[in-house]
Each structure stands twice: as structure tokens, then as C-alpha cells.
Amino acid sequence: MNTRRTPSRARPIVALAAAGMLAGCAGGGVGGPEGFELANIAESNIVPKSSPAQFVGAFARFCLDTAEADRPAALRGADYVPFAPVRAASRVRTFVVDDRRPAVMLWGGGNCAVAAEARTGQSARTARLIAERFPAARPVDPARIGPSIEAAWLSRPGGPVLATFRIVRPGMPSRHALAILNDS
């Protein structure tokens, strides 16, 4: 991988990080009944303070165990609703739910991520999940994946990259995300 520019598979997640991970809601630009539901969502639940179990559980369920084509239906079946991207040009489809489960983001090539406010135990639980689900995973230099990447693992030779990133903004709670990045 070229270390001087962000690989294409990481660009959407990096763009999302730069946009502040779903800052503000106001219905998210979604119309109809879901627009009303989004308008009533507690701002703290857009990117909530998920427990470590909820954080990795949502990642396993929607990003690892559900086929790419089935993810939107699975998310809707779990009471998530689509949230319009922060930027119209974004290719990221974000789904949120009005409770403490993490936001889920999907974009081309089977890429998938979950995001929540940082909470104790998330990093340890993430490391355990990766060790259990990807026993052949090997750490890679996060700088090779993109800016804001905290840790990264190559799942297997030629396989997807698993990555975590953290967004720290002055005066705001930090946010944590876990993604599976496929070539796109």
C-alpha cells in the first residue's frame, strides 16, 4: 500500500471522521415516517455511548455475519433507520436507532463500520473479537491505512483490513469506530 495517500477503501471512513461522525440530526434529510422518527431521536443516540458488548455485537451481526446485499434489510429489521449522509456527495449509508446501539455505516465494496462514543472496554473487546473471529489476522501500520486510524489488522493475506479509529474533538466526547475495509 502507498503510505503517502489514503487507500480508496479507507477514504469514506476518513471522510466520515473528518465530518465529525454524524454531527447534528434534524431529521437527517429523510422524509416520511422515518423522517419524523429521526426528528425525535435523542441527539445522544445518533452516535451513542454503546457498551463494549453492544459495540462489537453490532459489528459482528451487521458487518461480519450479514451478507452485504442483506445488510440494509437486516438493519431495518433491527429497528435502525437510514440517516442521510452529512455531505450529499458521501457514498456512506448510515443507519441509526434511538437507543444505545452504535450507528452502522455501509459503503461500496462490502465496507462496513460501527461508531459510538468511546467507552471503557471497547478497545479490549474489539481486540478479543478480532482474535476470535480472525485468528490469522496480523497487525499492520495504521498510517498505511489512513489518517485517524488507531489500529489495523490484515484479516488474512489478500483479505479485508479491520481498523479502529478515534475522533477526539475539543470539549466533546471522543468517538470510536470499528470497520472492515474491503478493496473497492
Image: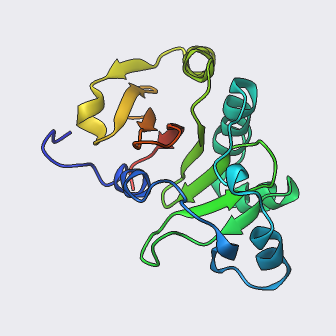
Query: In this image, 159 relative to 176: left or right?
Result: left
Q: Find residue 119 and report its image quarter.
A: top right
Give residue 22's position: percent from left, percent from top: 55, 59
Q: Residue furthest front?
A: 171
Q: Residue at horizontal 47%, vertical 78%?
A: 88
Query: In this image, 53 relative to 108: left or right?
Result: right
Q: Residue at horizontal 44%, vertical 36%?
A: 166
Give residue 7's position: percent from left, percent from top: 27, 49
Q: Residue at horizontal 69%, vertical 57%?
A: 43
Query: In this image, 166 relative to 126: left or right?
Result: left
Give residue 32's position: percent from left, percent from top: 81, 85
Q: Nearer the viewer, residue 36 or 56?
A: 36
User: In the rendered view of the protein, which quadrant contains the N terminus?
Assistant: top left
Query: In this image, 159 relative to 111: left or right?
Result: left
Q: Nearer the viewer, residue 166 or 153?
A: 166
Rendered position, 47 above or below 166: below
Q: Nearer the viewer, residue 93 or 99?
A: 99
Residue 134 visible in the displayed image: no
Rendered position, 10 above or below 51: below
Q: Residue at horizontal 46%, vertical 27%?
A: 155
Q: Nearer the viewer, residue 93 or 118?
A: 118
Residue 83 visible in the displayed image: yes
Give residue 36's position: percent from left, percent from top: 82, 77
